Image (tube, grey):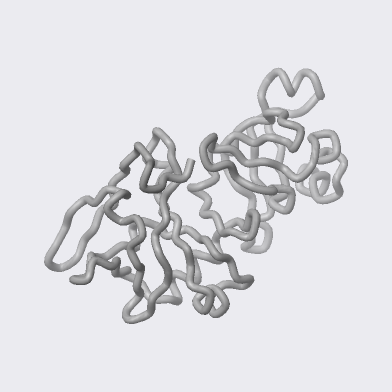
Amino acid sequence: MLLDSCGSRASGVQVGGNRMSEKLEIQELLQKEVYVGDTLVGVIVGERFHPRDEFVRSMRIQVLDGVAEEYMRKPADHAPLHKELVHSIRPDGSVKLSKSMRELQRRWRNTVRIDEQLWAPDELMDRAVMDNDGVDIGNVVSLVKVKRTYRGVVVDVHGVLQRRMSLPDQIIIPVTQLARTTAYLDEIILRCPLNRLLSLPSYLQLNE
């Protein structure tokens, strides 16, 4: 679930600077502009909903086109903003980050692209994974990197499905098969049915 101004959850964002240290709720940051120095990066649009705070370490921001083109390998209109990067609130109400654009660029490289958006690992952990026929496969427990790039998500497979389809406890699903996320059910939807997934060369290679 991605919270907007109608959301019910209010996870805190610790803001620390030389002169201030306070905890702001996500509702107070919605639609706030985000700056690195004098560079406008984008606007905060919400965050994931999850009852456990360790799975909500990033906010979602809508990124300016020029910034996306310059600092992303492939431009994306929405991306994560790790809460620990928030330094302070400027006099005009906008958000100041503590790091450089180089650091933001580094973190955006450490993401997964789903439906032309960038997602941080903490935004994917523990999400339910469904195939495009609505079959509930399991939940994301970790991610797999190949040559410093995320190539797959590790999913704990539900026991019933393990027995029915002779699957192991865990499978690795290629990130290229992640079609979209759902806003309110905290799910990841695949591009294809499970039977088709299990026969794909990219799946077989990751699960050797």
How far across and how far down the image is residue 115, in percent? 65, 55
Q: Is residue 187 above or below residue 108?
A: above
Please give left or right for residue 53 compared with residue 132 in the image.
Answer: left
Q: How many labels does the image show?
A: 0
Question: Which residue is rendered at x = 33% and y = 58% of the image?
Answer: 84
Q: Nearer the viewer, residue 62 or 130?
A: 62
How far across and how far down the image is residue 80, in percent? 47, 58
Residue 204 found in image quarter: top right
Please give left or right for residue 18 compared with residue 160 in the image.
Answer: left
How far across and how far down the image is residue 40, in percent? 38, 76
Question: Which residue is rendered at x = 43% and y = 37% of the image?
Answer: 50
Question: Which residue is rendered at x = 69% and y = 51% of the image?
Answer: 175
Could you tell me which quadrant the C terminus lies in? top right
Q: Is residue 118 above or below residue 5?
A: below
Q: Which of 155 and 24 is in front in this view?
A: 24
How far across and how far down the image is residue 38, in percent? 33, 81
Q: Residue furthest left?
A: 19
Please give left or right for residue 110 compared with residue 114 in the image.
Answer: left
Residue 49 found in image quarter: top left
Q: Residue furthest front?
A: 6
Question: Which residue is rendered at x = 81% and y = 24% of the image?
Answer: 165
Residue 43 found in image quarter: bottom left
Q: Which of 39 and 142 is in front in this view?
A: 39
